[in-house]
């Protein structure tokens, strides 16, 4: 059942946003909110109600919202066409909403962060030796300026880098994306499957069928989209930071001044 749902999540988007969210939420809540059904036979019905309520709330939050990659298309799976085919930025938006609701954040706070006029993209693979420094710099400065939309856009330039992306995508639908992403960013290698699976095991229980789950994940379109956006923005080397599609130097001053300048424009 779980493997079937996971395969659907990685096929070309043919579903409405509700169907897309349902597939994610089923896996998300099974993993995040485990229930002993033999002790609580009514839990299956309660879990279904919880999933329905969450889907409705996520639908409301994401209604008619365009992909933050600024491609001009709507979020993956959106009934509003054309829909984005699921670059890292679009997937991050959906994961942010699901994880925020699970952590107890109020809808108003989530909407405030999503409505920010600033999107910070970091184009770099998990295997890049500079990724930890650049990521932590961007996160620190953006947090000080009350900005939360910082997205990693890995181009998947090597086989090892693609393994890390697959592990991150596996974690996304387990409801563990943020914590595993952070672990991958701070991981210095090696990048073989056994090491990466052991890394996930530090934060989540590994199912016996993990190889089937991983093999069911397709990342080609995601990588192609992220590489396309990097090319459109004139990126020639990695890591590179862009703020609202514009390349910004990876320094505290440059990031801070760019963010403050955009906020000033939107406050006038």
Image (spheres, helix red, strand yellow):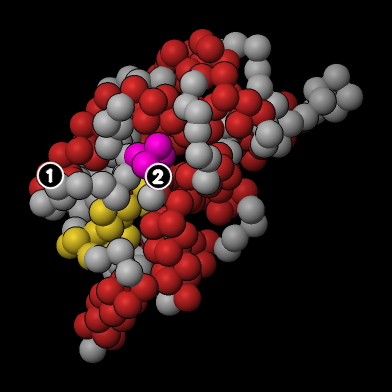
Residue 16 shows in this picture: no
Residue 131 appears left or right of 240: right
Which residue does the numbered mark 2 point to in the structure image? 129
Question: For numbered disc 1, what is the local secondary structure?
Answer: helix
In the rendered image, the quadrant that contains the N terminus is: top right
* Residue 8 picture quarter: top left
Q: Nearer the viewer, residue 250 or 20?
A: 250
Residue 29 appears left or right of 15: right
Report crowding for label 2: few under 14, some 14 to 19, many 20 or more residues within 10 A (C-alpha): some
Q: CA distance from mark 1 to mark 2?
A: 22 Å
Which residue does the numbered mark 1 point to in the structure image? 231
Q: Nearer the viewer, residue 159 or 96?
A: 159
Image point (68%, 34%), residue name:
202
Q: Which residues are magenta?
A: 125-129
Question: For numbered disc 2, what is the local secondary structure?
Answer: loop
Image point (20%, 47%), residue name:
237
Image point (27%, 85%), residue name:
264
In the rendered image, the quadrant that contains the C terminus is: bottom left
Query: Magenta stretch: residue 134 in it?
Result: no
Q: Nearer the viewer, residue 144 or 184?
A: 184
Report crowding for label 1: few under 14, some 14 to 19, many 20 or more residues within 10 A (C-alpha): few
Position of residue 42 measured from the top left corner of the image (x, y, whole percent): 80, 28
In primary-sequence order, the first of circles 1 and 2 is 2
Image point (50%, 28%), residue name:
190
Position of residue 208 measured from the top left corner of the image (x, y, whole percent): 65, 12
Q: Can you say whether 13 is above or below 260 in the image?
A: above
């Amino acid at each position: 059942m779980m493997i079937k749902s996971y395969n659907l999540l990685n096929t070309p988007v043919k579903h409405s946003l509700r169907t897309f969210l349902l597939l994610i939420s089923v896996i998300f809540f099974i993993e995040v909110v485990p229930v002993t059904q033999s002790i609580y036979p009514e839990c299956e019905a309660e879990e279904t109600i919880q999933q329905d309520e969450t889907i409705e709330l996520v639908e409301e939050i994401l209604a008619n919202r365009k992909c933050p990659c600024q491609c001009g298309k709507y979020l993956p799976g959106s009934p509003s066409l054309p829909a984005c085919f699921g670059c890292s930025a679009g997937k991050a938006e959906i994961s942010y909403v699901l994880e925020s609701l699970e952590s107890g954040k109020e809808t108003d706070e989530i909407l405030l962060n999503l409505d920010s006029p600033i999107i910070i993209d970091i184009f770099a693979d998990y295997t890049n030796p500079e990724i930890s420094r650049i990521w932590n710099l961007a996160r620190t400065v953006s947090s000080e300026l009350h900005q939360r939309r910082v997205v990693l856009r890995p181009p998947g330039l090597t086989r090892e880098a693609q393994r890390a992306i697959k592990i991150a995508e596996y974690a996304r639908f387990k409801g563990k994306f943020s914590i595993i992403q952070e672990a991958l960013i701070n991981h210095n290698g090696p990048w073989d499957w056994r090491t990466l699976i052991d890394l996930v095991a530090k934060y989540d229980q590994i199912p016996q069928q993990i190889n089937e789950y991983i093999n069911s994940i397709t990342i080609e379109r995601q990588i192609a989209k992220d590489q396309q956006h990097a090319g459109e923005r004139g990126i020639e080397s990695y890591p590179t930071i862009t703020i609202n599609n514009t390349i910004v130097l990876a320094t505290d001053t440059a990031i801070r001044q760019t963010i403050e300048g955009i906020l000033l424009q939107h406050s006038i």
